[in-house]
Amino acid sequence: MQKQLFVIALAASVAIPAFAQDEPQKPKPPAGHDHSSTGHTHSGSKAFGRPGDPTKVARTIVVEMRDPVEFFPADITVMTGETVRFVVVNTGKHEHEMVLGTMKELEAHGEMMKQQKDMHHDEPHMAQVAPGKSGVIVWQFTRPGEFYYACLVEDHFELGMYGKIRVR
C-alpha cells in the first residue's frame, strides 16, 4: 500500500508542474489512428462540461487505474463550475485510459473503438496511459448531473472499468 501511495505521489508531483504552465502541453498520440483523423474531434463544450483552464484549477484528484480492470476512486463528487485536474495514474501492466462522458456517449464510443482497434485518443476529455505512466485531464464541470469515466481499451468497459462523477 505504501508503495502505491508513493507511486501516486511521485506521478502527481511530476505531472502537475508540467500542466500548471499557461500553455498546456499535450503529448502526441502514438502512430496510428486518432479521433482527429476520423472526423471525431470534439474539443468544445459537452453535456458534462468543457476543457478547463489549467491556471484556474480548484483541486487535483488522483485517479488510479488498476489491473485487472478498476478505477480508484470509482465515485467522485465535484461542484458545478469547478475546474478539476485529474492526474490519471496507470499502476497496472496493461494500457488503460480515462474517458469522460455520459453513459450513452461512452457506450457509443466503446462500440466505435471495437470497429477501429488501432484508435488513439487526443482530446481534452480523454487520457490514454501506458503501464507505469500518468496522464492529466483538466476539465470544468458546467452543469449538475451524473456523468461517468471509463476505460474503453479492449473489453475493459464491458468488464466494469468505469466510475461515476456526481456534479452538484
Image (tube, rainbow, N blue to C red):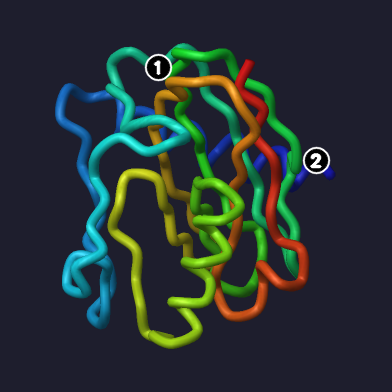
Disc marking residue 57: 1
Mark 2, Cα crowd under 10 Å, few <14 / some 14-19 / many 20+, is few
Which residue shows up at 47% across the image and 34% down it?
A: 48
Q: Nearer the viewer, mark 2 or mark 1?
A: 1
Question: Residue 15 vs residue 102: left or right?
Answer: left
Residue 153, percent across and down?
Answer: 55, 73
Q: Is residue 10 above or below residue 150?
A: above
Please state which amino acid type lies under the numbered disc 2. Gln
Which residue shows up at 51% across the image and 38% down it?
A: 87
Asked whether the residues under the numbered discs 2 and 1 touch, taking CB atoms below 8 Å apart as contact, a structural biologist would say no
Question: Residue 54 vs residue 1: left or right?
Answer: left
Disc marking residue 168: none
Residue 56, percent across and down?
Answer: 33, 13
Sooner in the amino-acid sequence: mark 2 or mark 1: 2
Question: Residue 111 vs residue 142: left or right?
Answer: right
**Between marks 2 and 1, how big is the CA–CA gap?**
27 Å
Disc marking residue 2: 2
Which residue shows up at 34% across the image and 31% down it?
A: 50
Residue 129, percent across and down?
Answer: 47, 60
The answer to which image quadrant residue 79 occupies is top right
The answer to which image quadrant residue 161 occupies is bottom right
Which residue shows up at 64% across the image and 72% down it?
A: 93
Mark 1, Cα crowd under 10 Å, few <14 / some 14-19 / many 20+, is some
Residues 150 and 10: in front is: 150
Considering the image in quadrants, where does the C terminus appear?
top right
Residue 138, percent across and down?
Answer: 39, 32
Considering the image in quadrants, where does the N terminus appear?
top right
Question: Residue 49 vs residue 158: left or right?
Answer: left
Q: Circle 1 sits in a helix, a strand or a loop, which is it?
A: loop
Q: Circle 2 sits in a helix, a strand or a loop, which is it?
A: helix
Please state which amino acid type lies under the numbered disc 1. Val
